[in-house]
Each structure stands twice: as structure tokens, then as C-alpha cells.
Image (cartoon, rainbow, N blue to C red):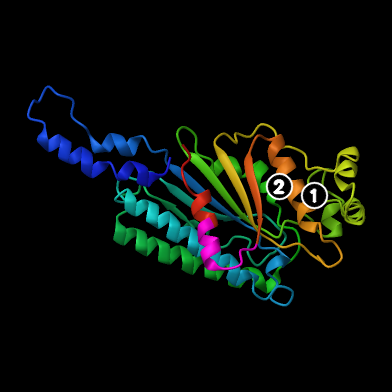
């Protein structure tokens, strides 16, 4: 349920509390209203592969940072409704492993997280938000120096997600900024297990058969292997900034990419969605607000 539905009731409950003279009558405590709202754990997973190469995709790094800023703005609006101090929400910005030496050991990685339980007042939140945006800017500046192929989203979810997942009442919202192509250079691909990347030879076949590609996909068992032994409870994932290639030759390219990811998430009982690049900031904010809302 959306936070605003609860918060609109708080002034009413306060007035009722003032009008009740009998101390034995039930008193309404506004703190209990906050306690009934599930806290949120937001994770933004970045694909810093050659999708942000300034020669191939000159605007992508800026687009990613626009998304990050929008996430922080929307996250901040929610904290304001809690009065900041009543919130237990958390936010982390992380990046998937890859061979890019420019981002290994990124020195600002500890400044890409935010925990509202750290007595986060409005001034502290504004300061922390500024630090996160500055750190993200530095991260992208470093990453584009040697942007290579193959951000390993699969392995991050398998090996790192558990470190960020929150149990209990928390709703985990994972935003993945990626072009959708889970692929690697040849020297890396030959060492990866089947089902942990897109097989390009099979993918090319799917491209050439727009009428029956899904039947071929199922027959060849082309999907990603489900990750086992990981707690994905109360987790939703949204892949954003999906960028289909050569759509003039392959008009169903987005459908192929979407099928790979949704099929994979369905196998792991993860509620997921896959969306293309947003046409403008208003559409972006609408999509993010809808995703970063509590459900009834």
C-alpha cells in the first residue's frame, strides 16, 4: 500500500486522540502507522560495460546518471513522508563484475549507499545524496576510460545479491541499468558454463525466425540457468535502458531480450519487468514511482 494512504490518516488520528477524554479508551499511536508500512530496500545495479562507450553510445553514461538522480529524488520524497527519522529504508548503488581495470577497487564504493536508520535527518539526507551523485559521476568517469564487454549481472546476483538483500518485512527493489545483452568477449565466453550468457550463434538463429523463435528457444533450452540457493523472497527486479540493436533488421529484437530475462526471473519466482529507454524525464519518473511503491 502506498505510504501516502497511511500518512493522510495521521492528522485525523491526532485530532481524535485530543478529543478522547477517557484514558481507558483506546488511544491511536501514529508510530504504529509507520510500523505497518513495509520498509524498502532499493538496489541499483549498474552495467558499466561497453554500453557506456562514449564513441559507440555517447549519451548512455549521462542517461544512467539521470536515472540514478531520479531514483534518489523519488526515494527522498518517500523519506520526507516518513519525517526521515521514522524511516528504515535503505538504498545501495552497486556495479556488476567485469574485466575493466579502471573500476576495480573503486575508491568511492563505500559512498554509494544510504541507510535511513543512521539517524538520517533532512539535512543529512541532502548531504548524503550529494555525495552519492558526485561518487557516481566519478565512477562513470573512470569506467568509460576502458569500457569493455561483459558486465556479469548473472554472477553478481548469484554471489553478491545476498549481501544486499533484506529479510523480514523489507520489500527489495532491484533496478538494473543494462542494454540487456548478457554477453562476453570470446576469451571469457569459452570459460563460462552454459546458461550463464547469451549464446550468439543461437541468438542469431532466433533473429532469423521471427515467426517461431519462441518454439526454437524452448526446444534448444536457450534460457539462462536459474540461480539456486539464494533468497529472492520479496524481491522485484526491473531492467531499464534496454537498447535493442539493429532493429531495422530485427524488429522483434526487444521481444527476444525480454523473453530471456523474464523467463529467467520466472524460474526463480522473481517478479520482474523489462523496459526500453524512457523517452523523457516525466515518463522515467512515472515508471520509477510506480516501481518504487509499496503494494497492497
Secondary-structure class at tag 2: helix
Q: Provide the residue designation for mark 1.
A: 197
From this view, report whether residue 34 is shown above or below residue 72: above
- Residue at x-position 71% and y-position 66%: 51
Considering every residue shown, the one lying at the far top of the view is 24
Tell me where residue 32 appears, x and y as whole percent: 29, 34
From this view, report whether residue 95 is shown above or below residue 212: below
Is residue 227 visible to the viewer in this orientation of the structure? no
- Residue at x-position 11% and y-position 31%: 20
Q: Give the magenta-colored segment's residue range.
A: 277-286
Q: Main secondary structure of the magenta part?
A: helix
Tell me where residue 276 appears, x and y as whole percent: 67, 59
Tell me where residue 198 appears, x and y as whole percent: 82, 51
Tell me where residue 115 appears, x and y as whole percent: 41, 49
Tell me if residue 285 is in the magenta stretch.
yes
Secondary-structure class at tag 1: loop
Amino acid at each position: 500500500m502506498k505510504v501516502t494512504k497511511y500518512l493522510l490518516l495521521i492528522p485525523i488520528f491526532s485530532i481524535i486522540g485530543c478529543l478522547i477524554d477517557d484514558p481507558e479508551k483506546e488511544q491511536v499511536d501514529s508510530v504504529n502507522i509507520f510500523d505497518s508500512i513495509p520498509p524498502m530496500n532499493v538496489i541499483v545495479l549498474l552495467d558499466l560495460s561497453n554500453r557506456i562507450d562514449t564513441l559507440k553510445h555517447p549519451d548512455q553514461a549521462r542517461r544512467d546518471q539521470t536515472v540514478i538522480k531520479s531514483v534518489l529524488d523519488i526515494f527522498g520524497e518517500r523519506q520526507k513522508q516518513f519525517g526521515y527519522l521514522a524511516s528504515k529504508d535503505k538504498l545501495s548503488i552497486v556495479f556488476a563484475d567485469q574485466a575493466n581495470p579502471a573500476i576495480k577497487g573503486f575508491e568511492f564504493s563505500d559512498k554509494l549507499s544510504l541507510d535511513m536508520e543512521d539517524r538520517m535527518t533532512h539535512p543529512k539526507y541532502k548531504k548524503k545524496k550529494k555525495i552519492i551523485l558526485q561518487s557516481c559521476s566519478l565512477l562513470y568517469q573512470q569506467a568509460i576510460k576502458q569500457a569493455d564487454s561483459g558486465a556479469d549481472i548473472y554472477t553478481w546476483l548469484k554471489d553478491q545479491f545476498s549481501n544486499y538483500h533484506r529479510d523480514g518485512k523489507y520489500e527489495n527493489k532491484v533496478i538494473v541499468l543494462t542494454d540487456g545483452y548478457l554477453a562476453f568477449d570470446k576469451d571469457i565466453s569459452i570459460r563460462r558454463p552454459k546458461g550463464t550468457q547469451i549464446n550468439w550463434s543461437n541468438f542469431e538463429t532466433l533473429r532469423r525466425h521471427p515467426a517461431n523463435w519462441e518454439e526454437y528457444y524452448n526446444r534448444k533450452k536457450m534460457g539462462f540457468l536459474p540461480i539456486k540457493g539464494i533468497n529472492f523472497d520479496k524481491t522485484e527486479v526491473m531492467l531499464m535502458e534496454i537498447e535493442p540493436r539493429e532493429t531495422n533488421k530485427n524488429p522483434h529484437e526487444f521481444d527476444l531480450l525480454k523473453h530471456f530475462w523474464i523467463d529467467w526471473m520466472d524460474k526463480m519466482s522473481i517478479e520482474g519487468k523489462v523496459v526500453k529507454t524512457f523517452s523523457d524525464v516525466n515518463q522515467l519518473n512515472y515508471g520509477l514511482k510506480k516501481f518504487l511503491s509499496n503494494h497492497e
